[in-house]
Image (cartoon, coloured by chain):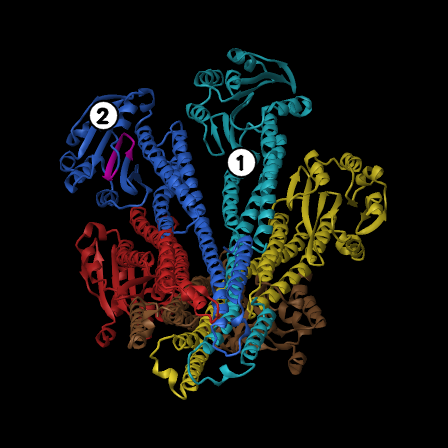
Chain colours: A brown, B red, C blue, D cyan, E yellow
């Protein structure tokens, strides 16, 4: 972590016609910005206040946006400040059983794009490499770089949701299994929480993409828009998967309750059945344990085996009947 | 499956004034496209990347759309890329107890329509045959072919939903049946899942048809629009059927829980009743089993039959009372 | 039923300035249609394909609308085909405990209105008679006849809903009654189903009336529009009644479950109380039934009555306490 | 009731510049209407058909509106008929435990306002008096009188809702009280019904005020509109209070069920505990009640007190343990 | 409280180019208002009617707004009266376990802002101080002061929600704990109530900010709008947090019910198990307590220990089996 802090500017490159033409220092970036058809792509990671102040000065960013980029813990959003767009996205990754949330902020201008990473997220180095390998696309300008970054973030959502969907499948098996356990209910609840976390990261994305696709942001050229529609499409799909999983989860919680009640009912039936089977000999034995002087059966030669046989027969009959009707 | 893979171009025909005028090779299609009043209708099935590349070159399709058409697993959508429409629909069929999902993609241009089938779906050969048998309709152009294909896909939804509605009816009978079973709850849940699958296939369709009917897509002529309204109408109906079934299913899950609780209550009542009927003679017998020296009843001549009769009478009275009040 | 089939054209009359001026044959209707200020009102019932073909030819109806009118089983809708409106409404009637659904379709043109009845519905003869008795209203043209027919259909919904509301009231009484029965749950479910059927018939009506009231359909003159607002108002009210009943039904289902659980709890309490009252003498009797040689109480002169009295006193005390605390 | 019927015209006054200038007879009202800057304010109560016919003739009201005003049982609504507005509001009052619903209809024209009361509602005499005491406001015309009447109706909603909120508070106490009673569930349900009645009266009001505030009704002058916004604001607040109460009620119904289940669980635990405490001496006594010839304990001098002490000790131990773990 | 009442005008200052230029008396404020580029910022606390009348006269406020500001108990709202905006916000603070609600009203004009505090809320002195320390921002005019005040109010919501979220976490632990308690259900309900209170305070805020950000209120200059977007963003986030907590709460209520049922089931199982273990020796003992003359076992030398051993063995076996299957 320490070295990351030290290395807060991950990368700062200038591009012309889709090709890298230099790696200016942050302090000299304004010189590159003056050159026509050139744009600058900067990657920052948890920058300190001085660094942000420097960047703000170079690119003329708005106070409120810079404050957000510093404090992090924003919800996904898109905001236009004059000619600059400020975009916040959430990054999601599975770390074992837990969801690891991070944030990436973007400043998009006519001739620059700045990404600011906070918390857990994959590096965007591979995105930059891929973009540099397709100069005919990257020459569309910083908006294309934005697309590439957003696409990479959204693509990381899919494995997370698939993990959650798998968990849901496992939960279903547990629910419809014979024994209802406390842990199952608890796991349903935890999964719900995780789905809600993902939902909160994803659902504002639809609106963000919508604005990038449609509204009159003159930063995004017409031929770049279909790319944002592609991200939009992924966002819609993820959203749908999450909603689907949530609805199934709700139903499974109700189904779980039904099955618990059925279990309870089965326990009662079984208990009632065995209570009857044990209770009857006890009653009969009690009767022949009475101390009346005149109880003719007591003196019969075969009274004892007779009573025992009859009682056992009755119990056997009950057992058979309960078994047949599903009580035992 | 192997021969299908081999036969990836199902059909490629050119039409003029609603009549088939030739079956060009994919590679020469551009020549037909130049001829006025002629349009080309191509059917592909799970095409490989080379085939798609060829098609893309011939018809000038957009990279993103072609990538979608190759990767499949899209949600139903409509996207305009310049003069070309890209439409994705889901196909649904029942395979035994399971729902079999597939996908069909369409590229619609001024003078061409290309269908790309993925996964399980019926062949569209019969659609083509029916269209060719009504040249006065097919002469409306590729948009009419699109309608015919969409109509055929949507018509396949109806039997699926009817099967699910039938399942719901069977479930209802099981629910309101005397005994609540674990399987019933599990089946309610499974049906819910299937309904949600259908819902996801159908609900975006409404929006797709809406755009084909209303928005200013100059690919669709005014006189063809009512046909899309027809598909729209079917989509609305299917959607409504699914929503209806889902709502009934939710209610039935709740009703199921109520009935389980009632069952449980009945078991308890019955058990309590019998426990009383068995418990009383046991108690009485216990009393006359005590070893006190001075218990006058024990020495009565008819003490034993008297006590036995009284006890049995009490039990009979209880039985009668419980029976009357519905406890047994 | 047979004679109805034979008599598929119920009525075909021409009107001028609100007064009936003739009863043309279907085949000659086009002659009446040419006459200025004259309109034709035709009533059909489950017409066969030839009849519909004839009508289509006379009035220039669209293929898709005619197909719908023939196949029936449509959802309520309104569709404009050029200058002609095609409207589908559901008719509802109570037949004993069941809801009987039918359909009526309307074709409305500048100078004609055609009604097509399918399935169960009242005859529209009385509507025609009433319209003919108010020529100052009927002279507003076929749109007024449409209003009169729609109003008559919607008025039939009210008694149906009132019947369902009455059922709900009866159900409430059953639910809050002392004993929870299986049938009650089942009846709640059946009522829900019926309400959903009515809902499906009514809710699209609001949109239909809205379009008749507001949109630029030049078939409906401004002074006729308030009449459709009247139908709209009824549709809103029915819709509201249905939604209200559904919400109450949902709540009653939950209340029902609560009451079942309370019943269950009461059974358990009662059982526990009696078990204690029976269990204590059994225990005491058991103790004095032990065969120890040295049990001084056994030899007491008044040991037996003493023990009996004490035990009975204890039971009485328990009974009193349970009674007071509501367990028995 | 009878004298009210006789006195159907409550009041009919003409106003000029906010001051009362006469009390014309209904039959001569048209003369007042001709005078510039003069408007007429009429209050009717459950008028008969002849009276309404007279009023209709004087003010040129639409057939459909007059029919509604006669038949009553309308939902709250606003309808424009040419230059006249027809408005229906519901009046609500608590009568003991019950909600008493009434209706008031308004006809608003350029120079007249007519109120028609149906069913239970307070008299509007005080509204008129208050308006007459502020001529600088009343001179804004009949729209201001409409505001004053609507405001008075809406103000009557507040005490009703407060009563219902109080009931909810009492219900909460009952729910979280130790014992769950059947009546509580029933009262929750009844409260829900009453809230739904209020909701139905209030929620359309928002739309009505919205139209009075915003839409291009040239009957309402710009400076009068803020007054309707005031009514709108009250309607929003009442609506919110009702929704709030409904949501709490739903939650309380669920909480109630949970508590019933907990109660049930507590009963079971207690019963189980006592059953064990009684069952163990019974078992031990049974063992020493066996008639084996060779049971050494039976001949011990202190066998009986020993067994008794041990058993009682065991029971005491159980009691202590159950008490500690909350089972008793 | 008493001295606060006496000190109802908290502060009244005039500003020019962001700097304080005087502290006029309320009665002379109109003189400051005449001076160009000067605006007045007044803070009132629960003002009496005379004070409000004076303020109304000085600033020409609308009757209805002043009445609202006096009576308080408004819902959050924004209303334009000519050139003046009237805004109502709710203030929220935790006081121990309880939520303390207050209200602040704002009158915003071209050259004045008046805040009126009602009930519990922090003083706005620090807001004024902070504004005065950034004259380059405060010179944007009274709209900036409005932003600063709103921002301060909204910032007070965060700790409240965080407290509630913490409570939710504690509740979760209690719910998934081994024993279900009555208090847990009651606490869930109370938390729900508190969340609803917060929700009611927050949700209208979104609409208010939206109007301040977007609509054509010429009181708010373009460069001030991003600041309101900042408040909007906070409102959205708080709203989302509340909705999230509410949904989790609903799920936890359901999970709670499931766990109560499982507990109940476990109690039943345990009871059933022990009943069997105690019931069997009782039955066996009863049998050998019968008084038949001919019961050979009774005379066996080792009859007693044999029966005892067998019975205890059986009980041990049952115990082991129940333990293994989780019944005990």
**Image location of residue C7, percent across then percent down:** 15, 33
- Residue visible at 33% across and 79% down in the picture: E294
Say if the magenta span includes residue B137: no
In this rendering, position of residue B177 left or right of residue E318: left
Residue at numbered disc 2: C14
Residues shaded magenta? C108-120
**Image location of residue B200, percent across then percent down:** 38, 60
* Placement of D254 over or under C169, stated as above or below: below
Quadrant of the image containing the C terminus of chain D: bottom right
Q: Nearer the viewer, residue A221 or A327?
A: A327
Q: Main secondary structure of the magenta part?
A: strand
Q: Chain of mark 2?
A: C
Residue contact at pointers 2 and 1, CB within 8 angstroms? no
**Image location of residue A278, percent across then percent down:** 38, 72
Marking on residue B143? none
**Image location of residue A320, percent across then percent down:** 29, 71
In this rendering, position of residue D79 left or right of residue E217: left
* Placement of A157 over or under E143, stated as above or below: below
Residue at numbered disc 1: D99
**Same-chain status of marks 2 and 1:** no
Q: Chain of mark 1?
A: D
SS label for mark 1: strand
* Placement of C99 over or under D10, stated as above or below: below
The reply to whether residue D318 is visible in this rendering is yes
């Amino acid at each position: 972590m320490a070295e990351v802090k030290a290395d807060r500017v991950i990368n700062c490159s200038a591009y012309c016609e889709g090709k890298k033409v230099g790696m200016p220092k942050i302090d000299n970036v304004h010189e590159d910005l003056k050159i026509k058809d050139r744009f600058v792509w900067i990657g920052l990671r948890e920058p300190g206040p001085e660094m942000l102040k420097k960047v703000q000065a170079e690119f003329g960013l708005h106070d409120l946006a810079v404050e957000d980029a510093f404090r992090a813990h924003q919800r996904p959003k898109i905001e236009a400040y004059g000619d600059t767009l400020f975009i916040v996205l959430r990054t999601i990754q599975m770390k074992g059983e837990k969801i690891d949330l991070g944030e990436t902020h973007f400043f998009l201008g006519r001739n620059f794009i700045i990404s600011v990473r906070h918390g857990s997220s994959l590096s965007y180095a591979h995105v930059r490499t891929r973009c540099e390998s397709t100069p005919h696309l990257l020459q569309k300008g910083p908006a294309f770089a934005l697309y590439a970054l957003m696409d990479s973030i959204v693509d990381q959502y899919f494995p997370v949701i698939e993990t959650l969907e798998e968990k849901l499948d496992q939960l279903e098996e547990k629910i419809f299994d014979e024994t209802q356990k406390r842990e199952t209910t608890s796991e349903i609840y935890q999964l719900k929480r995780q789905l809600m976390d993902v939902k909160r990261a994803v659902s504002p994305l639809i609106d963000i993409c919508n604005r990038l696709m449609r509204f009159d942001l003159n930063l995004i050229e017409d031929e770049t828009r279909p790319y944002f529609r592609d991200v939009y499409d992924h966002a819609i799909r993820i959203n749908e998967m999450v909603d689907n999983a949530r609805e199934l989860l709700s139903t499974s919680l109700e189904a779980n309750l039904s099955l618990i009640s059925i279990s309870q009912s089965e326990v009662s039936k079984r208990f009632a059945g065995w209570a009857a089977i044990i209770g009857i000999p006890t009653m009969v034995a009690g009767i022949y344990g009475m101390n009346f002087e005149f109880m003719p059966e007591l003196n019969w030669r075969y009274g004892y085996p007779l009573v025992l046989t009859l009682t056992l027969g009755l119990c056997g009959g009950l057992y058979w009947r309960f078994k047949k009707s599903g009580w035992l």
